[in-house]
Amino acid sequence: MTFATFNPPERTLMGPGPSNINPRVLAALSRPVIGHLDPAFVGMMEELKVMLRYAFQTENALTFAVSAPGSAGMETCFVNLVEPGDKVIVCRNGVFGGRMIENANRYGAQTVIVEDEWGKPVDAQKLEDALKANPDTKVVAFVQAETSTGAESDTKTLTEIAHRHGALVIVDAVTAVGGTPVKVDEWGIDAIYSGSQKCLSCVPGLSPVSFNERAIAKLKSRKTPVPSWFLDLNLVLSYWNSDGGGKRTYHHTAPVNSLYALHESLLLLQEEGLEAAWARHRTQHAKLAEGLAKLGLDFVVPEGSRLPQLNAVKVPAGVDEAALRARLLNEYNLEIGAGLGPLAGKVWRIGLMGYTCRSENVLFCLAALGAVLNTAP
Amino acid sequence: MTFATFNPPERTLMGPGPSNINPRVLAALSRPVIGHLDPAFVGMMEELKVMLRYAFQTENALTFAVSAPGSAGMETCFVNLVEPGDKVIVCRNGVFGGRMIENANRYGAQTVIVEDEWGKPVDAQKLEDALKANPDTKVVAFVQAETSTGAESDTKTLTEIAHRHGALVIVDAVTAVGGTPVKVDEWGIDAIYSGSQKCLSCVPGLSPVSFNERAIAKLKSRKTPVPSWFLDLNLVLSYWNSDGGGKRTYHHTAPVNSLYALHESLLLLQEEGLEAAWARHRTQHAKLAEGLAKLGLDFVVPEGSRLPQLNAVKVPAGVDEAALRARLLNEYNLEIGAGLGPLAGKVWRIGLMGYTCRSENVLFCLAALGAVLNTAP
């Protein structure tokens, strides 16, 4: 075995994530490592928490980044907030709702599923009906931005309904944060998780999470221990949280360099402003949608529920979707995403996330897509 | 809130980890991100698995890096291999044995504890006695290199004893791998985890893990589902494992850039050679030990059980240990570690791990330590 240094190709990343990373973030990433209890690092973590609160639009004290990818952020919410026997309603309209069901089941929940078609948003009436039929529901969970389809659900309304029936809300905002409005405090979201590698355009491997006081009260009143040491927020908090004067306790070694990078990504978001970032995603999405229409490509999701940052389009009849994606990758260094589950082989997913979401990439993608479609066998 | 780019100080990291990172690894880390299903990335993962097998000295197919820190590697071993009601013997001679107990308990094990004094290796006779008293033991778990004390336990002997009594073995090798011999196949270790930021001198945030066929058989014969979606090896493997022809399935987004860095760290280890790396740690440890003796500092661990890469020494009577560490950090940019648990306030932990383990650092550390000790109030 003789291997060499890995030099990755330079790709334009227009799939479902990771998105391209701003050179400033890569520069931050590669600064020298320091100790996870170094006062300089601890100071940086405090800034990081403030900037994460901005990204989530919250004042929640318990706002931090889980030291693992978005899937671990999901697990953090479920493992801390669901106890064996709890009734949990999960709304499923794509892959990630399905993953939530698996999470709830593994922690012993009585899981009730509200099904919607892939590509459609979660139906608020169905949730209302499910809650009426299950008045003992403790938690309602759904995905705001379904990465598998590009459908956006109405978090504000779904949260209101859940609260009216006395349930806590867990929201998957992995693909949402930074690309489309997510307003944790205004909408009253109880627990939420995101991912670093989507519209925040940081390296993959971190999951920003925020819990409000209601969620913390549920955690504190558990009858059983949290069935994970690594993700137990009672423990993680003694490291991340300072509560002003509290002493930081070692829990696990934080991913120091990835957190440097997240700090820089959030700084970029702050410099641009959240509203401006949302507007940029809308604008570029509109340009992309116009171009896709000219190419004769139809969206999976009905207008009005489309996420600007994740555009699922139907593969035209007779086109070998995998072969076309391979050509984009090999001839143009352009990555777009395949379909998942029932949409496998039927759709492409074109991401416009974070740093990737710029007009040069939209134009390039449309041109490359046009070229390979025109020369498809 | 107006924050700026975070520019960390340049520290010499001679604590319990992270260790300093070779510039080649930082350069690899900051290369452009590519998709986690990109054929170029998948090729890199294959090389990574081969090099991890070398680091662990194993042919185990199931050898990969968990996308989270060493604590998650520990949890991966326990969550997959322990079922509710299983009898698990944990040997505790420091912090990390204690953490293993917490893990076993959270997964419903009947936990039996074999206690040894902090600073002493695990006593093989005590394990033998515990196994005789508990013939229904399913798993024996212990820490080869106790980062909290610097004591090394005899993995080969402890594993032989456990196997003689029909138990599987889980070994914590977080601080061991790359610094001291760890021979998974020769010693018959069933499941093992390590960390990226110790003697491998990669960024913190990854946990190399290896399971042999016996461990996989235990996983496959579980009566209950693995109570974690993120760490369920049945699922993780469909992404990491290829078994030759198998199709890779998306599980979670891999921490792409951190894996570039791990690839480069393992390349450095391979270029140096494991035996040479072990010898380097022994040589530098001997130099450090000689210098510490001249400064009148005594080791916590008796000779013969000292880890070369983690040197715990007693704080001289009357010295304010925290003040002295702060001076080293502020005046010399030198990080050494504090004591944990019963050793808090009583010891310093001087790490000589991976890229940090060079004679210039040993000499610098001894000189700085001498200077602050001589001018201690």
Image (tube, coloured by chain):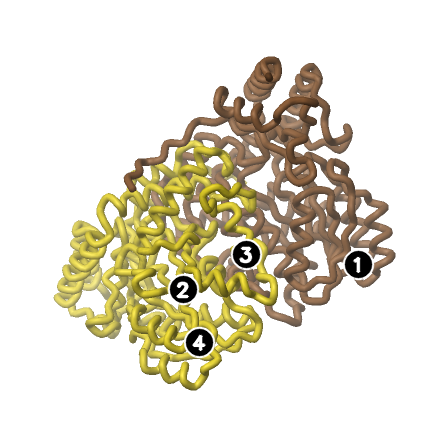
Chain colours: A brown, B yellow
Number of other residues with Cα within 10 Å of mark 1, as a class: few under 14, some 14 to 19, many 20 or more: some
Task: Between residue B313 and residue A19, name the one nearer to us.
Answer: A19
For disc 3, the marked residue is B232
Kindly indicate the quadrant of the structure image that contains residue B85.
bottom right
Are discs 2 and 3 both within one chain? yes
For disc 4, the marked residue is B89
Do the residues under discs 3 and 1 have CB atoms within 8 angstroms? no
Which chain letter matches label 3?
B
Q: Position of residue B9 (x, y in %)?
A: 34, 45
Amino acid type, residue under disc 4 in the picture: Ile
Are discs 1 and 4 both within one chain? no
Amino acid type, residue under disc 2 in the picture: Asp
The number of discs equals 4
For disc 2, the marked residue is B190
Which chain letter matches label 2?
B
Say whether residue B55 is left or right of residue A303: left
Are discs 4 and 3 both within one chain? yes
Question: Of the residues under marks 4 and 2, which one precedes in the sequence?
Answer: 4
Q: CA distance from mark 3 to mark 1?
A: 32 Å
Q: Comparing marks 1 and 2, which lies closer to the viewer?
A: 2
Q: CA distance from mark 1 to mark 4?
A: 43 Å
Q: Is B167 above or below relative to A235?
A: below
Amino acid type, residue under disc 3 in the picture: Asp
Amino acid type, residue under disc 1 in the picture: Gly
Q: CA distance from mark 4 to mark 3?
A: 22 Å
Q: Is A267 above or below relative to A70?
A: above
| Residue positioned 85% across, 46% down in the render | A125
Say whether residue A375 is left or right of residue B348: right
Quarter of the rendering occupied by the C terminus of chain B: bottom left
For disc 1, the marked residue is A166
